[in-house]
Image: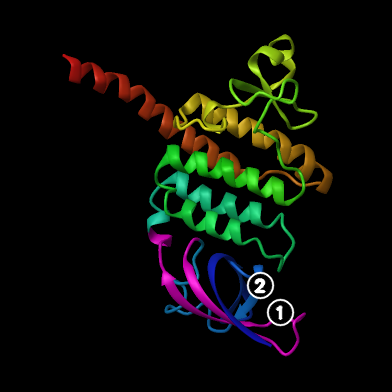
């Protein structure tokens, strides 16, 4: 058995004296494991870092075997991803989300989305929005997708302000106001047709929204916790974005004066 595919490196663990068990996600074959002989060498260590895009060739006698990887670098971005807390936590949190999916189950849209997010993890607003949409995509692939396209009560598609914690469906402001204290806030940037970027408040609301449904449908039933990486990413992204939100009005005032 042998195949070759582009992959994004997610992590590795030691195996013997010189080798590692590598974990990658590929476009065609999903999350996949394989042994890399000599993976702890000085030559391979810079390549086998989370976030790097690589080409892998997998070989095994039978399909169900662990098999071995031959790894070639394609896009080495791990060094850049180590420069900010948002990126460091983000890589770990994204990998943890992918581990919720069955091994060797292809999700090509998640592979493409991950590749885009990794190129923007040093931009807190963009990274935060992309991360939220990635979590929504993972929830959808796990069978717990949210319906945020129209109001569950009226069918209207504008002024959506809430999400029902019971059904995961959007509710417009007028229909939801009487039960607002029981609803989850729907950030404006997740509304259909809205192009407004997230600010720190709307991004915080989005993290609460996806976190609620991940906990209810995925983590709690499996006896898992969201983990420190997601919390670290959320805090780092919100802190950086809040600082940018505070600076923006000052800059605008200086320009006017």
**Helix, strand or loop for disc 1:** loop
72 vs 142, left or right, is left
Residue holding disc 1: 66
Q: What stretch is highlighted in magenta?
A: 51-79
Q: In which quarter of the image is residue 80?
A: bottom left
Residue in front for this viewpoint, 191 or 184: 191
Residue under the point 45% across and 29% down: 196
Colour convention = rainbow
**Helix, strand or loop for disc 2:** strand
Are the residues tagged 2 and 1 within 8 Å (C-beta)? yes
Residue holding disc 2: 33
Residue under the point 19% across and 18% down: 254
**Callout 1: 10 Å neighbours few (<14), some, many (20+)?**
some
Q: Position of residue 101 (x, y in %)?
A: 72, 57
Residue 116 tag number:
none
- Which image quadrant: the N terminus? bottom right
**Callout 2: 10 Å neighbours few (<14), some, many (20+)?**
many
Q: Where is residue 119 in the image (x, y as percent from the top left)?
A: 42, 54
Q: Can residue 239 be seen in this view?
A: yes
- Which image quadrant: the C terminus? top left
Residue under the point 48% across and 72% down: 54
């Amino acid at each position: 058995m042998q195949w070759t595919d582009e992959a994004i490196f997610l992590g590795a663990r030691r195996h013997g004296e010189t080798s590692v068990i590598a974990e990658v996600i590929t476009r065609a074959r999903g999350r996949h494991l394989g042994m890399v002989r000599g993976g702890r060498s000085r030559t391979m260590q810079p390549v086998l870092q989370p976030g790097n895009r690589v080409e892998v060739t997998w070989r095994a006698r039978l399909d169900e075997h662990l098999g071995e990887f031959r790894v070639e670098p394609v896009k080495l971005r791990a060094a850049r991803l180590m420069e900010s807390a948002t990126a460091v936590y983000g890589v770990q949190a994204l990998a943890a989300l992918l581990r919720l999916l069955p091994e060797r189950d292809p999700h090509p849209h998640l592979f493409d989305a991950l590749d885009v997010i990794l190129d923007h993890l040093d931009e807190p607003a963009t990274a935060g929005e992309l991360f939220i949409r990635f979590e929504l995509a993972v929830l959808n692939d796990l069978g717990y997708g949210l319906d945020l396209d129209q109001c569950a009560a009226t069918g209207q598609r504008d002024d959506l302000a809430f999400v029902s914690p019971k059904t995961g469906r959007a509710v417009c402001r007028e229909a939801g106001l009487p039960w607002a204290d029981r609803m989850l806030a729907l950030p404006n940037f997740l509304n259909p047709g809205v192009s407004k970027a997230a600010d720190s408040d709307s991004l915080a609301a989005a993290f609460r929204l996806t976190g609620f449904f991940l906990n209810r449908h995925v983590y709690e039933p499996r006896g898992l916790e969201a983990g420190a990486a997601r919390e670290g990413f959320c805090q780092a992204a919100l802190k950086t974005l809040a600082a940018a939100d505070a600076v923006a009005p000052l800059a605008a005032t200086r320009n006017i004066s």
